[in-house]
């Protein structure tokens, strides 16, 4: 069974909205887009690249897929992230059928819990979820997340969409790694602790 890992860049108060650019996601009047830009360094880049080795599939919500598909397919193979994303299977969880143009992208068929359980039961390696806040909320609700890799930035925004939203039960986590960067970002690796 493949592990499903949620990989997110968040602020200290859990905001994940609009990290990349000012206009990435202005839902709810969010005005702090691009907040992650000042915090990049070589340690963070190496930590992000490290996760690529075991990743054999990506899972996105529709909005995240559309944003990613606008950018990554046109990036050169000399970019390690572009090369990996473009060559790896990508699955999109959506209730509204739409046409996928990114190479090796597929719509995830059926109800979320059944479809993701089926996806996890085939193949080897890890399934990575990037962004996709609404999808992550559903995955958490169905106890489908096995690990988290969080890039926690030393910044409090006080507003914006948060990674952990409404949950129907507590989730216990075990810290498996903590790497500080030169800019104060903490790369935290957690495993979900299950009693069964």
Image: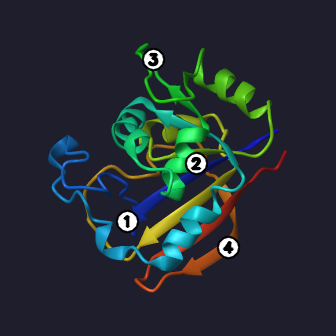
Q: How far separated are the C-alphas under marks 1 and 2?
A: 30 Å
**Dot 3: few (<14), some (14–19), or many (≥20) neighbours within 10 Å?**
some
Upstream in sequence: badge 4 or badge 1? 1
In the shown orientation, is residue 162 left or right of residue 30?
Answer: right
The mark closer to the camera, 2 or 4, is: 2
Q: How far apart are marks 4 and 1 (CA)?
A: 20 Å
Secondary structure at badge 3 equals loop
Q: Element type at marker 1? A: loop
**Closer to the camera, 101 or 138?**
101
Q: Position of residue 23 (x, y in %)?
A: 19, 48
Disc 3 from disc 2: Cα separation: 27 Å
Q: Mark 4 points at which residue?
A: 177
Give the SS element for disc 4.
strand
Q: Which of marks 2 and 4 is nearer the N terminus?
A: 2
Identified at 27% across, 65% down, the residue is 35
**How many other residues sit within 10 Å of disc 1, few (<14), some (14-19) or many (≥20)?**
some
Q: Is residue 62 above or below residue 55?
A: above
Q: Mark 3 points at which residue?
A: 95
Callout 4 environment at 10 Å: few (<14), some (14 to 19), or many (20+)? few
């Amino acid at each position: 069974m493949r592990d499903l890992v949620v990989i997110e860049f968040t602020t200290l108060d859990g905001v994940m909205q609009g990290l990349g650019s000012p206009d990435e996601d202005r839902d709810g009047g969010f005005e702090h887009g691009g907040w992650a830009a000042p915090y990049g360094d070589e340690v963070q880049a190496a930590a992000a690249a490290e996760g690529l080795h075991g990743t054999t599939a990506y899972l996105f919500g529709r909005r995240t897929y559309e944003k990613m598909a606008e950018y990554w397919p046109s990036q050169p193979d000399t970019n390690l992230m572009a090369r990996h994303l473009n060559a790896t299977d990508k699955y999109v969880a959506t209730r509204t059928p739409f046409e996928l143009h990114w190479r090796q992208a597929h719509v995830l068929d059926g109800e979320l819990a059944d479809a993701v359980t089926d996806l996890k039961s085939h193949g080897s390696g890890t399934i990575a979820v990037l962004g996709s806040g609404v999808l992550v909320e559903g995955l958490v609700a169905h106890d489908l997340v096995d690990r988290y890799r969080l890039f926690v930035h030393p910044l409090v925004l006080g507003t914006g969409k948060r990674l952990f939203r409404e949950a129907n039960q507590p989730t216990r986590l075990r810290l498996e790694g903590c790497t500080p960067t030169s800019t104060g970002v903490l790369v935290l690796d957690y495993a979900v602790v299950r009693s069964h």
